[in-house]
């Protein structure tokens, strides 16, 4: 059974579109189960009915025409119950419904199973038999397993259809919506540009070219480059292989010859496709055919094709990169956006961000908030390569992406864009005013940075210091570790730009969701593994170079403080302090006159909440990293879109933990700040202020929003709200209470909690 299932799925995976996929399913199931009829019905949202989309056994003329409402017939019953229906005497069931155009009267036994994807019934898979008999448990299990595997494929195909503007039954559709999670607030309507990791043949989108001859010449140039590489490889390896093994290289060269792969690619380019798309298509076709073969030798050849085509793709992309043009305003779309991909788009062209993977807490989302660019993350089933070149709407507040927008929808979003413009004009007027409540309570607003852009934007918005400089960001954007001298320059820029205000530099926080491309860390459980200070402690040479660079950069300014990430025990604090002092001593010996900076610790690991006294005897300040602290308190991966709905820094237990931390840290006479994303959520910021946090450090975009909300409430109001909130049992109730308070305080709807958390 497993073998049959595997082969059906494989065949379906190779189908060119939804219709072909469904035809394969009904044909193969009818044959395998030896039944008279196998049919697939799919829900057409536009009609609100289950439409017969493919059949083997019923009248083929009825495909696309026969349909049932959810309350009609046995098919409707399967869909309504979202569970299998297995009947010996279908015709005597009260829900039996005869559709004349299918001519199904001679069939008696019926087995229907729902096709479910993300809790939604997409359709129903049915088998029927003329004689009276119940399908046995094995047959039922087979159909259920098949339908579970098909659900993802069907959802994917449907989504592709929606992008091009058609429902499963071919009705023209608009406003196809793809649901994800909020990444950065804001709304944008602009052209999508799909980007992909280098040399990945599986994700290259189709794109039109105008100058076909130029594209062919470009392709030939790259192909030739690979031929040269392979010939050189062959020479290099000559002595190490037997002649018959060397033949493999000749076979490679043959595949690359003008009348083999190359010719096929050129034929596709002549149809108007760009070289990368044409190459990817040829590679996919060959690989699919070879992988479906029973012969081991031929299946192996699929690997050769992939390897060869990836080599050609490498050159195509390498050269393309230099002269890539982006639309004036574009939404960057990818399966998984990286910081490096963001950095490649000129800032003035980047209007929005969409990533099929990742969540509101992943680093690309944090960067997009810092840059003030609306972002939607974790959009499952997004056919991202199909979006390239299309106008889309990104709703960063709700984490949604719309394609094929109707005029009404576009107008609605244009209205929000206008509202946002008015709001930011209004916020401009408070940039030089203090962040204090109506009754004069002051809270300091600092900024989180990673790029120089953040620094400049946040200075304009009246930030009072840098509460978190994520030093890993410049590390992530390079292809090797920056040297001590390079680091010194980067750090100096930040320190100078904020002088005389304080700049808190966090030592390298890699691992977890932040792997450096040139320092791969492969672990089963990266968030519980080798990350943050743990990496630095095992590589003191990296740590020392970094803190030396920080201290050198602060020479003559002395506005630096150092922050240690992911601390889980006192040994890490002691060892870090020892290395910092050693580096400081070295610099003094080298003739530099630098003060030893204050050192602080991030509380991101719950265990540390119970060692505040021990910390206080060692360090000078504490910053609470609510992103990770909540992740570890709730045991919810902050980047997993499947569970992002239950990750919230407004969970009552997280709030109670934060209140306890503020009290315990103040009892030791230390200053305490919050530098997680929570501080930039205006409603949450009011709660943190009421808890007594001295500094709120956030992304540059949130600075004026938070200030505007703080300036609209009294400290007493905030404390009363906190008291009420701390008695609540669930997150939604907390959000509702905060929103009501903000509403009563006359806060703009775009600033309320439900829109920003
Ligand atoms: C945090 O965990 O709250 C934090 C600020 O660190 P990062 O988001 O960089 O992990
Ligand atoms: Mg963290």
Image: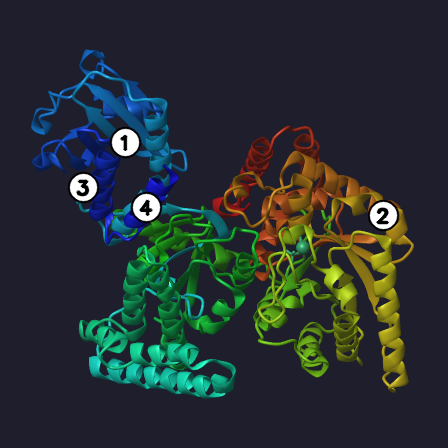
Q: Look at the numbered disc 1 and give the secondary structure of its residue.
A: strand
The mark nearer the N terminus, 2 or 4, is 4
Residue under numbered circle 3:
169
The figure's colour scheme reads rainbow
Image point (35%, 83%), residue name: 222
The mark nearer the N terminus, 3 or 1, is 1
Q: Position of residue 22 (x, y in %)?
A: 23, 42
Which is more foreground, mark 2 or mark 4?
4
The mark nearer the N terminus, 4 or 3, is 4
Where 689 falls versus 203 (above or below)? Answer: above
Is 522 in front, or is 168?
522
The mark nearer the N terminus, 3 or 2, is 3
Image point (81%, 42%), residue name: 663
Residue under numbered circle 1:
124
Residue 317's image quarter? bottom left
Which is more foreground, mark 3 or mark 1?
1
Left or right: 506, with 664 as reference point: left
Residue 232's image quarter? bottom left
Disc 1 C-beta below 8 A from ligand 1:
no
Locate ligand 1 by image quadrant: bottom right
Which is more foreground, mark 4 or mark 3?
4
Q: Which mark is residue 612?
A: 2
Is 337 in front, or is 415?
337
Residue density around tag 1, few if under 14, some if 14–19, many if 20 or more, within 10 Å: many
Residue under numbered circle 4:
7
Q: Position of residue 749 (x, y in %)?
A: 48, 44
């Amino acid at each position: 059974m497993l073998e049959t299932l595997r082969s059906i799925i494989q065949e379906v995976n190779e189908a060119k579109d939804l219709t072909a996929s469904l035809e394969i399913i009904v044909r193969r199931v009818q044959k395998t189960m030896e039944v008279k009829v196998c049919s697939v019905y799919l829900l057409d949202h536009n009609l609100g009915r289950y439409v017969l989309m493919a059949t083997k056994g019923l009248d083929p003329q009825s495909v696309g025409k026969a349909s049932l409402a959810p309350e009609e017939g046995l098919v409707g019953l399967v869909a309504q119950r979202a569970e299998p229906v297995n009947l010996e005497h279908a015709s005597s069931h009260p829900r039996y419904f005869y559709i004349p155009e299918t001519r199904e009267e001679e069939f008696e036994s019926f087995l229907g199973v729902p096709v479910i994807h993300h809790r939604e019934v997409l359709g129903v898979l049915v088998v029927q038999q003329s004689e009276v008999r119940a399908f046995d448990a094995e047959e039922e299990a087979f159909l259920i397993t098949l339908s579970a595997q098909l659900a993802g494929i069907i959802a994917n195909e449907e989504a592709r259809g929606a992008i091009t503007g058609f429902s499963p039954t071919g009705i023209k559709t608009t406003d196809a919506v793809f649901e994800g999670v909020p990444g950065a607030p804001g709304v944008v309507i602009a052209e999508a540009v799909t980007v992909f990791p280098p040399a990945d043949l599986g994700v290259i989108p189709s794109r039109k070219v105008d100058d076909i001859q130029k594209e062919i010449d470009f392709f030939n140039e790259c192909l030739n480059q690979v031929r040269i590489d392979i010939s050189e490889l062959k020479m290099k390896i000559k002595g190490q292989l037997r002649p018959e093994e060397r033949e493999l290289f000749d076979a490679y060269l043959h595949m690359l010859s003008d009348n083999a792969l190359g010719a096929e690619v050129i034929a596709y380019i002549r149809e108007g496709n760009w070289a990368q798309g044409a190459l990817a298509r040829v590679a996919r076709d060959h690989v699919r055919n070879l992988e479906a073969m029973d012969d081991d030798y031929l299946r192996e050849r699929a690997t050769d094709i992939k390897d060869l085509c990836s080599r050609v793709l490498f050159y195509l992309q390498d050269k393309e990169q230099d002269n890539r043009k982006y639309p004036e305003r574009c939404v960057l779309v990818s399966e998984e956006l990286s910081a490096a991909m963001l950095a490649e788009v000129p800032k003035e062209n980047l209007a929005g961000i969409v990533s099929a993977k990742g969540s509101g807490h992943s680093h690309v989302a944090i960067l997009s908030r810092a840059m003030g660019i609306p972002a939607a993350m974790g959009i499952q089933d997004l056919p991202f390569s199909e979006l390239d070149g299309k106008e889309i709407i990104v709703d960063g507040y709700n984490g949604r992406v719309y394609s094929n927008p109707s005029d009404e929808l576009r107008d609605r979003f244009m209205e929000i864009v206008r509202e946002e413009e008015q709001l930011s004009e209004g916020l401009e007027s408070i940039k030089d005013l203090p962040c204090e409540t109506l009754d004069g309570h002051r809270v300091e607003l600092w900024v989180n940075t990673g790029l120089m852009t953040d620094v400049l934007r946040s200075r304009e918005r009246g930030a009072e210091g840098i509460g978190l400089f994520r030093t890993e960001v410049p590390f992530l954007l390079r292809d090797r570790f920056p040297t001590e001298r390079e680091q010194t320059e980067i750090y100096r820029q930040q320190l100078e730009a904020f002088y005389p205000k304080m700049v808190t530099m966090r030592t390298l926080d890699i691992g977890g969701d932040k792997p450096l491309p040139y320092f791969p860390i492969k672990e089963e459980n990266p968030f519980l593994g080798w990350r943050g200070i743990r990496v630095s402690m095992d590589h003191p040479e990296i740590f020392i170079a970094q803190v030396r660079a920080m201290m050198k950069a602060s020479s003559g300014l002395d506005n630096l403080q150092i922050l240690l990430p992911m601390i889980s025990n006192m040994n890490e604090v002691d060892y870090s302090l020892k290395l910092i002092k050693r580096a400081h001593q070295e610099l003094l010996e080298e003739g530099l006159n630098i003060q030893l900076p204050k050192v602080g610790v991030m509380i991101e690991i719950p265990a540390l909440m119970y060692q505040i006294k021990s910390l206080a005897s060692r360090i000078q300040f504490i910053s609470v990293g609510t992103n990770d602290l909540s992740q570890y308190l709730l045991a919810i991966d902050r980047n997993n879109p499947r569970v992002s709905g239950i990750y919230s820094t407004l969970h009552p237990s997280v709030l109670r933990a934060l209140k306890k931390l503020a009290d315990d840290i103040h009892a030791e006479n230390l200053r305490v700040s919050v530098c997680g994303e929570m501080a930039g959520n205006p409603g949450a910021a009011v709660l943190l202020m009421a808890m007594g946090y001295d500094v709120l450090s956030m992304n540059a975009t949130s600075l004026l929003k938070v200030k505007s909300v703080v300036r609209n409430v009294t400290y007493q109001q905030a404390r009363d709200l906190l008291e009420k909130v701390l008695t609540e049992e669930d997150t939604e109730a907390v959000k509702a209470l905060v929103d009501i308070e903000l509403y009563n305080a006359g806060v703009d709807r775009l600033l309320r909690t439900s829109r920003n958390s």
